[in-house]
Every structure is written in C-alpha cells, then in structure tokens.
Image (spheres, rainbow, N blue to C red):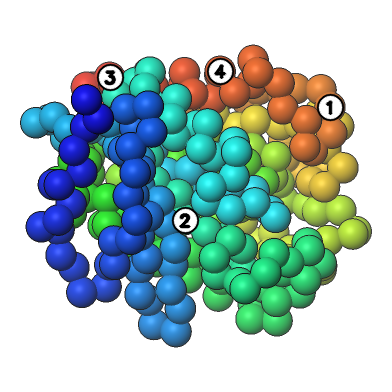
Amino acid sequence: MEPSTDWLDGVVHPDIEWLDDQVIDGVIERSFRITRPGRRVPGVLWLPPSGSAAVPLVLLGHGGSGHKRSVRVVEHARWFIKHAGFAAVAIDGPYHGERVPVPLQAEQYQARIAEVGIEVILDRMIEDWQAAIDAAVISGRVDSDRLAYLGMSMGARFGLALAAEMNDRFRCLVLGKFGLRQCSAMHPGMAVPERVARDAARITAPLLLHVQHDDQIFPRDGQLELFGLIGSQTKHLVTDAGPHTHTTPAAITRWRTFIAEHLTDDSREP
C-alpha cells in the first residue's frame, strides 16, 4: 500500500503553492512554487512515509546547467529518505530549470547573472533557500533544528552564502568543486573572491570540503585557499583526482555518510 499524501491538503501559506505529488517506491515527492518579490522559486520536497516524528532536512543544491530534478539531486534525495529516514528539498537556481522557458548554456546564464550582479543573486538565493526551508517546515514533517546542506560547484557557491547567513542553523555542510578563483572561460562578472572569503570566515557548522584535484573550472589552489578560510572548528578536506565533472561513487558515499552521521547525532559540536 502506497503512503498517503493527504496530510498536505491542509497545508496553506499565501506565498507557497503546492503542485503535483506522487509516491515512488515509498518516497513521497511533491512539487511546490514559492512567490518572491519579482520572481517565482520552483522546488521539490521529498519525504519518507508518514510518521509522527519530525525528521532532519537535507538541502540539495544543484550544479551549473542542472536543475532541481537532475539525476544526481534525485539520487541524493532518495538515498537520504530510504537509507537515513530524512527529508530533502531542492530548488532551481537562478536562470535554471523552471525559472527559464528553455535551458540556457553556461555562457548565457552566467551573462544574465553578471548583468544583475552576482552579489545580488547570492542574496536572492539566500532568501529563496530560506523560503524553501519554510515550505518544508510548514508541512509539519521536518525538524527545523536539524538541517544540512549538500552542493557542489554552483551548488557550493550558493550554499556557502546561505551557510554564512544562517550560521549555526546547520548541523553540517558538504561543499566542493568551488574556490576563490575561476578559469578564464567563466564570465568575469561571476568572480567575487572578497565576498566568498567573507562568507567562508562566517561559517561555523562542521564542514566537509571536496576538492577536485584536476579541476579545470575552479583551480585547485583556490579551493585549498577557501578551505583555509572556513571558520568552522570542525572541517575536513577530501581530494579526488580527475576534472571538474568527475565524481567517484566513493566520494558520493563520503558526502552522504558525513551528513547522515551529523544529523543523527543528538549532541551539538562546540
């Protein structure tokens, strides 16, 4: 018997519109759309079968040219639900997914971000993610005191800014494939090393930073420098060989295990 999603029928919020829902292999999945000033934020909330206890929530940030339902994002969400009993949420990044009529190439969305201003976009994404957390919490199924974030590349860019703003609201963070410097092929307007450095210093949550040794998008030295600037007392650095898009199954296991261990530990690290 498939778990019911009737609990969502009574969830009302003026800025949140719940859309289609489905249950796939025991995982509840429901789309939503948040109305923000001047924009709409499409998202997906994944939940385990109905139960009485509120569960931890993992925020999943997708990479550049991806979206909230990218294969890797969905795989993460389903793993956290089926293997750890958590909830997960993802939203489309700026000029990605359902925020645009058709998919944009990297040079196109980077140009649009640069035109608006990368720091403006960073601040908007902080607000968008906070609204997505609110959407998950009002469902009554999520423990707002047990949050984690997982994101690589563009997902790490926005996750870093969000974690700096929310500070100790997160139990842990997994970021990577991002650093203080970028390759020449990226739009120069995407580079804000001073902002990245300031945000890194504000982070206090336990963190795992994944560095891609042969990264051709974000040079390794800039990633290592970012790690040194992270303010967390507990931080771990892992390095894998290969270019920017290369990810091994072992790396994915490390990311998920790090989050699962921190969200199931009732004690807070100092």
Residue type at numbered disc 4: Thr
Q: Is residue 109 left or right of residue 203?
A: right
Q: What percent of the width, then of the height, locates residue 86?
A: 31, 30
139 or 128: which is nearer to us?
139
Between 71 and 55, the one nearer to me in the picture: 71
Helix, strand or loop for disc 4:
helix
- Disc 2 on helix, strand or loop? strand
Mark 2, other Cα within 10 Å: few <14 / some 14–19 / many ≥20: many
The kind of secondary structure element at disc 1 is loop
Q: Nearer the viewer, mark 1 or mark 2?
A: 2
Mark 1 to mark 4 CA distance (whole Å): 17 Å
Quarter holding residue 260: top left
Q: Nearer the viewer, residue 212 or 181?
A: 212
- Mark 1 or mark 4: name the one nearer the start of the chain: 1
Please identify, in this view, whether the residue under mark 4 or under mark 3 is nearer the observer: 4
Residue 202 in sight here:
no
Indicate the position of residue 111 as horizontal and vertical percent values.
Answer: 76, 74
Outermost residue on the bottom side: it is 38
Q: Which amino acid does label 3 sit on?
A: Asp
Residue that extends furthest to the front in the rendered view of this protein: 1
Q: Find residue 253 and name its label.
A: 4
Q: Where is mark 1, residue-wise? A: 242
Residue behind mark 2: 91
* 17 relative position to 240: left or right: left
* Sequence-first tag of 3 and 2: 2
Crowding at label 1, few (<14), some or many (≥20) Cα neighbours within 10 Å? some
Identify the mark nearer the N-term, 2 or 4: 2
N-term-proximal mark, 1 vs 2: 2
**Residue pictured at 65% horizontal, 51% vertical:** 66
